[in-house]
Amino acid sequence: MGFISELRHPTTLYAKLFIAFLTLLFFVLLATVAISGFLVYRMVLPVRTRSDVDLKNLPGHPVVLTFNVSGEGPRDGWFFPGLKNAPAIVLCPAYDSSRAELLTLASALQDQQYNVFLFDFSAHGSAAGRSSLGFREVAELRAAIDAVVNRGDVDANHIGLWGVDMGAYVALSEAVGDRRVTAVAVESPYEHPNDMVALDIGRSGLGSLPFITRLSQMIFRWLNPQFRNVPPLKTRVTQLSGVTQLYLESPEDPILAASTSDLFQASAPPHDLVTLEHGNYASMLDDEKRIYENRIVSFFLVKLPLVR
């Protein structure tokens, strides 16, 4: 009882220092939890950048194609028609990006007579909801592919996918279990959404604070308990035999460059690895975009031929 009494009403210097230490520790832990919670909140609900686009003013005669995502509700995307019964290519935007930023890439592919589909992931662009950094987004991509295939005027057995960071993770994840996907081009994929949590915190400048990254990952896992047993991509890309893959590595982000290289090494051939001078298609200058688009178009022309 004397110890508890001393804690309640400290009289010695050591007791007072101990109480001060416990008080400081409590507020540090509280601040750490608050900061981590805010960072995760900002990740799963990023600021949506919407671009109002009038499809009537776009070349290529794109049309709105609606589809339904189980548990998420109705969505819509932009379908750019190409050659009838030719393969379709679905473009998967990066985290904190939207379909409107991929219009020139869509046009470059459509110019080669591919059917092209653009859509937004949850909490991005025109789509409401919250992001799971790739977990639930796989089902969104599958629903988008279903909608494209169900049109009846594309090659349902030869679908191409392209994506950057989160979009790349989603594209590879879907390709593992979807036999319709036969060619995938991905830039800067990560192995697991938890990696994206750590990456985003590092970009915020708070990654050096003790426990912030680990606690943020714990909160993120708590928000997505149904996906706790999803293995990292590195253990799954071994199943991509028969799916032609192009991995694009950007030296501007060493962490994602390393994960891109690791995934390439672990993946089943046929596959290729290319190191870009600059990454992140949406932020490229016009000349860089044209070079990038030519690379992507060339890949699909060879690996996803229009006529069989």
Image (cartoon, rainbow, N blue to C red):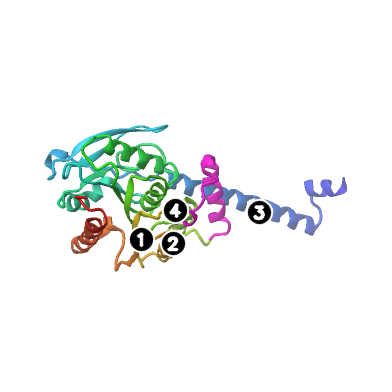
Residue 17 visible in image: yes
**Disc 4 target residue:** 239
Please name the residue that numbered disc 2 is placed on.
259
Across and down, in percent, residue 213 comes to 53, 55
In magenta segment, residue 65: no
In the picture provided, is 151 more to the left or to the right than 74?
left
Q: CA distance from mark 4 to mark 3?
A: 48 Å
Q: Secondary structure at mark 2?
A: helix
Q: Residues within 10 Å of mark 3 (few under 14, many from 20)?
A: few
Q: Nearer the viewer, mark 3 or mark 2?
A: 2
Q: Residue at x 87, y 48 (%)?
A: 2
Q: Amino acid at mark 4?
A: Gln
Q: Which is more N-terminal, label 2 or label 1?
A: 2
- Distance between mark 3 and mark 1 Cα atoms: 54 Å
Across and down, in percent, residue 285 comes to 22, 61
Q: Quadrant of residue 278?
A: bottom left
Q: Amino acid at mark 1?
A: Pro
For the residues marked 1 and 2, what is the alpha-carbon distance in whole angstroms? 18 Å
Magenta region includes residue 228 = yes
Marks 4/1: CA–CA distance: 12 Å
The amino acid type, in three-letter code, at marker 3 is Leu
